[in-house]
Image (cartoon, rainbow, N blue to C red):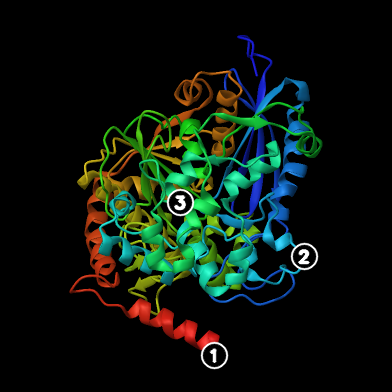
């Protein structure tokens, strides 16, 4: 599509598919102004306990319904368009991003297997959400075999492939429901599947393939390697994954008539390559320059940073050439639960008296607990916690680890635990930042995007724990804005993502500055966190595998 030099009246749409909902924004190409927003909550949310039919799911499962994703296109996009007031004819492109690794089995034509007659009650026919952690045994075998064979690619993933990634989840399907595996023509990231719905043809993007699909140096793992995991797994990559990869920000097709009817957008506009919600956010926060680490903080946190050199960083999620933007090595790390931890505590640890107080004061529970603990001196609650309620993504890469709170007494109040959990997530981030720097990947700036940036106490804790100034992405819908920036590039309005980011992205520099006294006090607590981190990691001579043993006891009890 040829775009005129005058972009004043041109617009693009970005759609962000999150864990619980999808968000669409209509953005002006000239300056990135967000003119309209639409949000659609998934009707089935996260399927963790049962399928829609009521069939129970085992522990550590997390599935989603692809029908919910289509509804975002039918509802959120038209709502954003109506909210913006712009004429649909002015929209020149659309781009999407997705949680990852959210992956699903489909037919050759792209129909999810859970929508095929007779398969709706087969759990493995459904899409596996990023936080599906039941494939940990498969991940352990993938890692052991890679190290035993000296596979070069394992170092690019910090030495350990996560149970969240494509291969572990696919191997779980093969071993637990081989019939569904045999019916799987395509094993595809939701980030690519949703693009298939928009443009009518299968595409694959370099980001998900590199970070979640073990695609390195132009190839997936070899058939010889995969056969060591299971003979029937040998051709997994060549038969179910193999497809030409599209660069981020590139056009991969045009909007079909059917998708145009869903969205209210013009048929034929540019559709950009799929992307991951974290990585696509970098240009929205002007965080594409080398060394500017972006933490996208929501239900989980993903840390992405560009670097000039290729390095093996222990325990990260991966490094991909051009994985965030062209011309740099994109590094990813993360924490599997952050906002989820705070939400869990509000659900489980707050008494009715606190709920009544919050209602009387017109506060949310988050606001009330933050207010109650904001004036505490550092260490005043006497607690240290490990932020592993959803396992550990980086740097231990072990989703059978679990949370720990040390120092509880009869005097401990709900706000004490809440603050300790905030601090624990900051300590986990510090582990990640220091691991990057020790491996030779500089971190010169710390930028935050996502819903948790709105909590001032949390942001100040991060500044103090990290000894770093914290900048904030201006947009409250930064992933969707990032997708819109990629749509503008795909439509030809800008030559590349970096140029578009300068025009359309925005950041509030150094919104939070560390306090030297609090930072020094946090150093003492961080040392205690490190002690617990190493002890409960189930690794090394001084480690204890008690968390693994408890997980095994629980699973055996629930499966009896």
Which of these two is toward me, 185 or 296? 185
In this picture, residue 168 sits left or right of residue 178: left
Q: Residues within 10 Å of mark 1 (few under 14, many from 20)?
A: few
Quarter of the image where the N terminus is located: top right
Residue at image point 44% right, 68% down: 231
Q: Secondary structure at mark 1?
A: loop
Above or below, 444 against 168 in this view is above
Q: Earlier in the sequence, mark 2 or mark 1?
A: 2
Residue occupying the far top of the picture: 5
Residue occupying the far bottom of the picture: 560
Quarter of the image where the C terminus is located: bottom right
Q: Residues within 10 Å of mark 3 (few under 14, many from 20)?
A: many
Q: Which numbered disc, 2 or 3, marks the residue closer to the eye?
A: 2
- Mark 2 sits on what residue? 117
Q: Secondary structure at mark 3?
A: helix
The CA distance from mark 2 to mark 1 is 31 Å
Q: Residues within 10 Å of mark 2 (few under 14, many from 20)?
A: few
Residue 382 appears in view: yes
Point out residue 155 in the picture as x, y percentages from the top left corner.
Answer: 28, 52
The CA distance from mark 2 to mark 3 is 29 Å
Residue at image point 34% right, 52% down: 157
Residue 161 appears in view: no
Q: Secondary structure at mark 2?
A: loop
In this picture, residue 258 sits left or right of residue 471: right
Above or below, 34 against 120 in this view is above
Residue occupying the far right of the picture: 261
Point out residue 165 in the picture as x, y percentages from the top left corner.
Answer: 46, 57
Above or below, 59 against 105 in this view is below
Point out residue 285 in the picture as x, y percentages from the top left corner.
Answer: 47, 33
Question: Which circle marks residue 560 in the picture?
Answer: 1
- Mark 3 sits on what residue? 212
Q: Which numbered disc, 1 or 3, marks the residue closer to the eye?
A: 3
């Amino acid at each position: 599509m040829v775009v005129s030099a005058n972009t004043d009246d041109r617009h693009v749409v970005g759609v962000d598919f999150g864990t619980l909902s999808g968000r669409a924004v209509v953005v002006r190409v000239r300056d990135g102004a967000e003119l309209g927003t639409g949000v659609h909550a998934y009707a089935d949310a996260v399927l963790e306990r049962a399928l829609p039919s009521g069939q129970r799911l085992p522990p550590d499962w997390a599935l989603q319904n692809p029908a919910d994703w289509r509804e975002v296109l039918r509802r959120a996009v038209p709502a954003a368009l109506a909210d913006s007031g712009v004429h649909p004819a002015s929209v020149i492109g659309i781009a999407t991003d997705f949680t990852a690794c959210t992956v699903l089995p489909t037919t050759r034509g792209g129909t999810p297997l859970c929508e095929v007659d007779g398969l709706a009650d087969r759990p493995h026919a459904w899409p596996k959400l990023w936080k599906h952690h039941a494939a940990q045994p498969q991940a352990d075998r993938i890692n052991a075999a890679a190290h035993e064979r000296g596979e070069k690619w394992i170092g690019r993933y910090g030495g350990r492939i996560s149970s969240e990634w494509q291969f572990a989840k696919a191997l779980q399907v093969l071993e637990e429901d081989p019939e569904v595996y045999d019916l799987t023509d395509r094993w595809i990231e939701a980030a690519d599947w949703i693009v298939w719905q928009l443009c009518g043809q299968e595409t694959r993007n370099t980001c998900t393939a590199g970070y979640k699909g073990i695609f390195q140096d132009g190839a997936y793992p070899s058939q010889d390697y995969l056969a060591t995991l299971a003979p029937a797994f040998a051709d997994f990559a060549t038969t179910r994954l193999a497809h030409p990869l599209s660069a981020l920000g590139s056009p991969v097709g045009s909007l079909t008539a059917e998708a145009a009817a869903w969205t209210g957008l013009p048929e034929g506009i540019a559709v950009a390559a799929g992307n991951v919600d974290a990585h696509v956010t970098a240009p929205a926060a002007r965080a594409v320059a080398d060394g500017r680490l972006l933490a996208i903080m929501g239900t989980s946190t993903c840390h992405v940073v560009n670097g000039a050199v290729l390095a093996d960083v222990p325990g990260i999620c991966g490094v991909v050439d051009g994985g965030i933007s062209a011309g740099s090595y994109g590094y990813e790390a993360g924490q599997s639960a952050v906002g989820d931890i705070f939400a869990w505590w509000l659900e489980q640890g707050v008494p009715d008296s606190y709920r009544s107080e919050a209602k009387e004061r017109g506060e949310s529970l988050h606001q009330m607990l933050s207010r109650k603990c904001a004036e505490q001196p550092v260490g005043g609650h006497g607690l240290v916690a490990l932020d592993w309620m959803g396992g550990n993504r980086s740097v231990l890469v072990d989703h059978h680890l679990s949370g720990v709170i040390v120092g509880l007494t009869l005097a401990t109040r709900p706000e004490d635990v809440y603050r300790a959990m905030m601090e624990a997530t900051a300590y986990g981030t510090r582990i990640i930042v220091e691991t990057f720097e020790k491996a030779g990947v500089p971190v010169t700036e710390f930028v935050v995007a996502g819903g948790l940036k709105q909590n001032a106490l949390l942001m100040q804790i991060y500044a103090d724990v990290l000894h770093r100034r914290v900048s904030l992405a201006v947009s409250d819908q930064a992933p969707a804005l990032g997708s819109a920036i990629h749509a503008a590039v795909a439509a030809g309005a800008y030559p590349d993502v970096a140029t578009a980011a300068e025009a359309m992205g925005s950041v509030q520099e150094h919104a939070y500055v560390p306090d030297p006294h609090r930072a020094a006090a946090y150093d003492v607590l961080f040392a205690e966190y490190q002690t617990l981190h190493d002890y409960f990691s189930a690794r090394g001579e001084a480690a204890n595998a008690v968390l693994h043993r408890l997980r095994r006891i629980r699973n055996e009890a629930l499966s009896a």
